[in-house]
Image: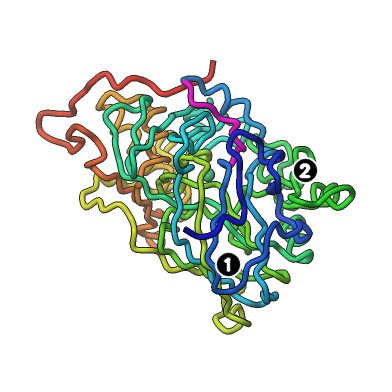
Amino acid sequence: MPEVIFSVDQSRSMRDQEVPGHNRWHPDVPNAAMVRPGDEFRLECRDWTDAQIGNNDSANDVRDIDLKRCHMLSGPIGIEGAEPGDLLIVDILELGPVPQQVGDAPGQGWGYTGVFAKANGGGFLTDYFPDSLKAVWDFHGQMATTRHLPGVRFTGITHPGLFGTAPSAELLERWNRREQALVDTDPDRVPPLGLTPDPEQALAGKATGSDAERIGQEGARTVPARENGGNQDIKNFTRGSRVFVPVHVKDAKLSAGDLHFSQGDGEITFCGAIEMGGYIDFHVDLIKGGMEKYGVTTNPVFMPGNVEPRYSEFMSFVGISVDHDTDTNYYMDATVAYRRACLNAVEYLKRFGYSGEQAYLLLGAAPIEGRISGIVDIPNACCSLYLPTSIFDFDVRPTAEGPKVADRGQCAVAS
Ligand code: ZN
């Protein structure tokens, strides 16, 4: 087992760890540890909310979540010899929930999928499901089940939602400028168009005093993916994946967190994977000057690993860039098209006895494939969503007899 170079006590907040992590991107967050190219090491992680969500049957905790505390990241880890312009090779060797522990923190034998209320960021289907929802999942080795979605059991596609290098001061300034410009186009929008820097609840690792204060004021929020990798939420970062991440600062400063037991493409519920704390083992190396050598200057490139659940049969749902509620045609809008594919899947699953809310949670958490199928056939973009049939303990395929309706319980809702 690789050496643990960032440890977490799951009974305490990230703020109260021996070496605290951080929840903003900033070049001046001090290194928590140093490694060399070629090293293998382990980081322990809190779940992304720092355990604001409990193993219970109410979504009030999702409704009341303080997004300013998110994401709780472990690191930064400095890589000796890394300089701006290099590519950092990040191999994901292994990851999983908190080993050998059962407890109240996400990752201690369980995880959750949440839907945010519209006022708090919402999700991909927020206009249809504006309230907070939750499903709590139990882990059985690689399998997940939940009392909130009976009749479903699947193998997780385990991956980190978020890891990345630190931005340079110049890159950070660009992020803040362009995101502020976007927010300024409609500053009162609900949910907001972006999350600009906010010192409240900022955590800056080992930085103290005025340094910590400045990091809070300038540091980029961790929600979107950016040029440093960040919250890409790519479900295919499974064990064995190799990711090439642009280096923007000396020592690269790699941080990681937001581990997912599983996730569907798009993570459509926002809090939408099966979220957990746990551990991740990395191997790192460097390609000196790699950004220019390979033309990898704006975003990472990666090679997916070989370890994934093997599902061979799917019920697939198609969506086009037409809002069928108003019969409005959008021009080549893949977002509208994927949303319609999701809504079509929800409508189908309701016929078997699930609520729309349960179906929404399932699409965020199960290993579904989302694809851009047609993006040139004017005026309609065409997207598709592939739902594995064998995750259900009943036949979910269409037959002449019609769908097998049953009492399928309910998910957690807010009071
Ligand atoms: Zn996540």
Query: Seen in the image, is 342 located left or right of residue 401?
Result: right
Q: Quadrant of residue 46?
A: top right
- Farthest residue to the top: give it: 415
- Is 377 or 263 nearer to us in this picture? 263
| Residue 186 lies within the magenta run | no
Can you give x and y, in whole percent of width and height, for residue 240 in the image?
Answer: 41, 63
> Residue 332, relative to residue 403: is it above or below?
below
- At x 52%, y 62%, the residue is 282
Q: Is residue 20 left or right of residue 63?
A: right
Whether residue 331 is visible, yes or no, is no
Region in magenta: 48-56
**Residue linked to disc 2:** 198
Which amino acid is tagged 2?
Asp
Residue under label 1:
299
Q: Is mark 2 within 8 Å of ligand 1?
A: no
Which of the image's four quarters has the C terminus?
Answer: top right
Left or right: where 360 falls relative to 288: left
Exactly how many numbered labels are in the figure?
2
> In the depicted view, which residue is nearer to us: 267 or 6?
6
Q: From the viewer's perspective, is residue 193 above or below residue 111?
A: below
Which residue occupies the extreme right position in the image?
Answer: 210
Question: Quadrant location of residue 4?
Answer: bottom right
Tell me which residue sits at (61%, 74%) in the image: 297
Look at label 1 and name its amino acid. Answer: Asn
Question: Quick check: 145 above or below 340?
Answer: above
Q: Residue 104, image x and y in percent?
A: 52, 29
Task: Name the element at disc 1.
Answer: loop
Horizontal side of 109 relative to 45 (left or right) equals left
Give the CA distance from mark 2 to mark 1: 25 Å
Question: Can you name the residue that lies furthest to the bottom here?
Answer: 293
